[in-house]
Image (tube, helix red, strand yellow):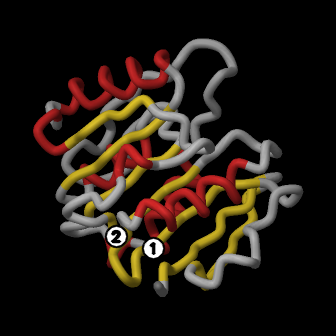
Amino acid sequence: MRVIAGKFKGKKLTSAPGLSTRPTADRVREAIFSICAAKIEGAVVLDLFAGTGAFGIEALSRGAAAAVFIDISAAAIQVIQKNISGCRMENRCRLIRWDIVKNLNCIRLAEPRFNLVFMDPPYNKNAVAFALKNLKRSDALEKDAILIIEHTFLEPIPGDLDCFVTFDQRKYGKTLVSFLTYVI
């Protein structure tokens, strides 16, 4: 797994050993960044269920201003720290070990607010619904923020949250990538 483009293009990223994380395939990440390219420059990024931190690091490589990485796994946090250090981006990053499904009080009323969010939760654990509800409660999103969610067909985007509007959805093998806007 490598950074695809930008300042750190080609930089190899470390993954956690075992099957505890499921990094987004390079080709899927490349497709995602092609779709949201215009939103990257200067973005304040939130990488939820961050795993290796590949999404946030890719965004920083392409010109995002800052990124916050959140994951519950201590091993994932160590891997993300290693990847951030390898790119020498510590001053633009913040790591938080937190249970996203429980709540997102760790970013409550964050400033600056996030305008680009990536979410790659464990599949088929109803984590998408909980994370979206907790994100709404956190009041940490900018109006018109873009959310990119990697999930399966078995766990669709919940339709009961009017503040999140799906504007695109792509299929990559067994994975769906949904693009939402936060409309307050």
Give the residue displayed 49% in from the left and 56% down from the top: 118
Q: Tell me if 26 is positioned left or right of 97 in this view.
A: right
Q: Which mark is residue 146?
A: 1
Residue identifier under label 2: 115
Q: Tell me if 126 is positioned left or right of 145 in this view.
A: right
| Mark 2–mark 1 distance (CA, rounded to whole Å) | 6 Å
Q: Tell me if 54 is positioned left or right of 44 in this view.
A: right
Label 2 with label 1: CB-CB less than 8 Å: yes
Residue 7 x %, y %:
19, 48
Q: Tell me if 42 is positioned left or right of 9 in this view.
A: left
Q: Which three-letter amino acid code belongs to the residue tagged 1?
A: Ile
Of residues 71 and 169, the one nearer the viewer is 71
Q: Residues within 10 Å of mark 1 (few under 14, many from 20)?
A: many
Q: Which three-letter amino acid code belongs to the residue tagged 2?
A: Asn
Residue 25 in view of the camera: no
Residue 25 position (above or below residue 138): above
Q: Residue furthest right?
A: 154
Residue 107 x %, y %:
35, 51
Quarter of the view holding residue 108: bottom left
SS at mark 2? strand
Of residues 73 and 136, the one nearer the viewer is 136
Residue 134 in view of the camera: yes
Give the residue displayed 41% in from the left and 37% down from the top: 53
Residue 64 x %, y %:
23, 59
